[in-house]
Amino acid sequence: MSPASTGASTSVDAVSPALLPDADTRLTPGGPGYRRMSFALFLAGVATFALLYSTQALLPLISGEFGVAAGEASWTVAAATGGLALFVLPMSALSERFGRRTVMTASLAVAVGVGLLVPFAPSIGVLVVLRAVQGAALAGLPASATAYLAEEVRPQALVTAIGLFVAGNSVGGMSGRLITGWVAQEWGWRVALASVGVIAVACAVAFRLLLPAPRHFRPGSLRPRVLLGTVRDHLGDPLLRRLYAIGALFMTVFGGVYTVIGYRLTEAPFSLPQGIVGSVFLVYLVGTVSASTAGRLVGRLGRRGALYLAGGTTAAGLLLTLAASLPLVLLGLVLITAGFFAGHAVASSAVGKAATHGRAQAAALYQSAYYIGSSVGSTVGAAAFHAGGWAGTVTVGILAVLGVVTITVAGSRAARVAARSTPVAAH
């Protein structure tokens, strides 16, 4: 049938660019705006982790000033991650209505404001409350950032883009602990926390100036029934449930190890000064590399293969840290960090691909599980350290890694069953 008989135009200009197969305007490596976007979210990741874990390297000093044990001091970390875990889903709903960039900007603004108040906390109770508020404010960052990337970046570049955001997390975690360690050694933990707050302000301003305006965001509904329906859909998806559990278990290991490691290294047989203990967090640079290369790892081994490798690397690192040799302990921390960040990047990017709708809620549920794992790891890891020393903390970590492996094996079996039950198309 001729174009004239159908009423169709013969002009290409009459066709909407969005309908052309090569008119994908989403960002891609090397394309316009991609570097600005990557650097902006990298800085957001730096600010998020620097603020969220700002007290972690300072716990021995906080314990000393307020006269509390490791378990009580660890609540300055657990309250922040718990606040984030509790509020990440509501904040993701706000991002569906008001936009990813708007919510991320507001979250950073509130978090850095609270960060400037934290150094003046007069008691451990006030410090814990301020940290909980700070964590709740930061809840607008992780899920919104993942949803922004899923909407604005081409699918083939998504793992790499999320890996760069996670790399920013590792740099923030490293720099925050490194700076606080050396500053605290000279001027005390309060000045150390103030220095992190100033750095976070600079990151927040640069983030807002650099992040490109979203082009593919479509406002959603704030109706509770719609939100709950989306959450039910995601929790009813077996693949998403497995990914949420994997994120929580990886973070249980990481939260426990890095909450307690300061106590171990300041005690015999190492007896390291606070500045040196802060420098130990330079191993986060390994996480920057492993997170940013997660895309290539998945390309070679597949998602499950990458998770097995990440879990095995983490377990090997945990066992090495049992040694009484400082070089072996440091090597163990390197392996734990590399395995954790690789596993986190793989799992979080898989959530973005698996969710066919309500991506912010899917990412929020992952982040909620992830930070619940951090809170559990920091409190249980500290309690295990108090009860059984470093071996107790390592035992908690090994059990969490075994959980990751078990869930991944279950996923492999479920995939094989699904493949066998799928009918073959007739030729």
Image (spheres, helix red, strand yellow):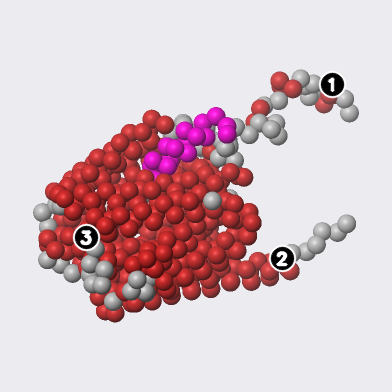
Identity, as a three-letter code, of the amino acid under mark 2? Ala
Q: Can residue 347 be seen in the rendering of this structure?
A: yes
Q: Nearer the viewer, mark 2 or mark 3?
A: 3
For marks 1 and 2, the one nearer the N-term is 1
**x and y percent of residue 402 in the render?**
48, 74
First-in-chain label (2 vs 3): 3
Which residue has dot 1 on it?
4
Q: Judging from the image, what secondary structure is the residue with disc 1 in?
A: helix
Residue range of the region highlighted in magenta in the rendering: 30-45
Give coordinates of residue 360: x percent, y percent.
47, 48
Q: Are marks 1 and 3 in contact (CB under 8 Å)?
A: no
Q: Is residue 73 above or below residue 396?
A: above
Residue 241: give x, y in percent of width and height. Answer: 51, 63
Instruction: Give the residue at mark 2.
Output: 419
Residue 20 forms part of the magenta stretch = no
Q: Find residue 273 and name its label.
A: 3
CB atoms at circles 1 and 2 under 8 Å apart? no
Viewed as shown, does residue 242 lie left or right of 44? Answer: right
Q: Nearer the viewer, mark 1 or mark 2?
A: 2
Q: CA distance from mark 1 to mark 3?
A: 83 Å
Is the residue 339 above or below the residue 386 in the image? above
